[in-house]
Image (tube, grey):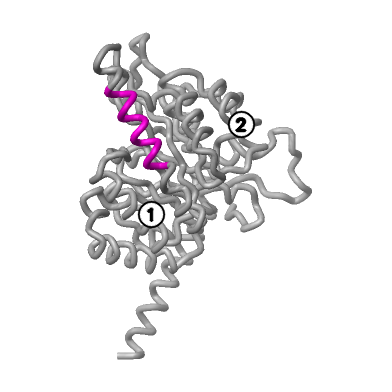
Amino acid sequence: MVLTDGDPDRRLGLNVPASWWPTAPMLKGFEAAGFGWVQVHSPPAAMLRDRARAGRHAAALRTTLETGALRLVLHGPDDLVAGTRDADRALDGLLDYAAATGAEHVVYHGANLPVADGGGAAARLHDRLAAEEESLQARIGRLEALGVTLAVENLAPVWPGPPRMCHSPAFIAALVTRLDSPRVGMLLDLGHAAITGDARAALDAVAARVTLFHVHDNLGDRHDGTVAPGLDPLRLDLHLPPGSGRIDWAGIAPALRVHDAPLVLEVHPPHRPEPLSLAEVTAELLLRDPARAAAPGEPSPTPLAPARAVREDMRRAVSAARSTRRARG
């Protein structure tokens, strides 16, 4: 089934993995599968501080995006923490990049700092968090002028290790609340929330602040030593397809169905099925009311047949483009 623009499943988005370039055929495949959004990672902070290079990069991305109708979520550098001179220059470059590419959401890893036990370390952490918050507050006017939403994400440890401030969804929600702007919201990463606590409880607690979701599965904090065939035996942040781990999606789905924020799938390439199957399975799992009866004559989901049709359509389009080039030559 290829989804239509009026379908609520158009809330679904798909991530282009970090360091990958989104080619036009890739984006066409996402769109044909029914995704309405694409998440693309920005260049690193050093490139964002170089306005000329960042501008060329943004222009190339805009050109690629204009081959289709996907809406853009721009993911900022993972290690960008506002509140220093260099970081603030990179943040300004990130907002310039968002404006140039037409991004509607910019993902930002807020409060990405280690938890301090006390004493001098706690005082330094307090000052660093205050500097970050002041920097973000100073850029709210720019966000509002651009019509871009800064989505502050809760994180989780990739591997077992010490906690960071960003691992608490409640801490991120409180930061968003203090910033107090319709152009600053929370990105609730449900996979991360399942590692650091209970994803369903986190969603219930912070739903009013959420403007964007990240969706992926994992095996939780693995304190019980859980292992699974084909998966890294230690890694926590596995980024599996929804339904492939331990998250209670049946319990979470009703709250997602009544929310209106986009849901961006972040599934790592080794575990990622082709886009059409991923979109269909995720929509059935999260967005479609299980009590809804099929309309008379409505076909059951058959991902393989549409996938073949999409590939055939793309093959014909490529063949036609080659014929046009030959005719012009």
Along the viewing direction, whichever of 22 and 192 lies nearer the viewer = 192
Residue sticking out furthest to the top: 224
Q: What residue would you read off at disc 1?
A: 95
Q: Main SS type for the magenta part?
A: helix
Q: Are marks 1 and 2 in contact (CB under 8 Å)?
A: no
Q: Earlier in the sequence, mark 1 or mark 2?
A: 1
What amino acid is labelled 2 in the image?
Answer: Ala
Q: Position of residue 127 (x, y in %)?
A: 31, 27
**12 or 211: which is nearer to us?**
211
Residue at the outermost right position: 296
- Tell me what residue is drawn at x 32 percent, y 40 percent: 82
Residue type at numbered disc 1: Leu
| Percent coordinates x, y for residue 248 in the rendering | 54, 23
Image point (35%, 39%), residue name: 268
The kind of secondary structure element at disc 1 is: helix
Say above or below: 54 vs 41. below
Q: Which residues are magenta?
A: 124-136
Residue 180 visible at all: yes
Q: Is residue 229 visible?
A: no
Q: Residues within 10 Å of mark 2 (few under 14, many from 20)?
A: some
Which residue: 35% across, 58% down?
Answer: 97
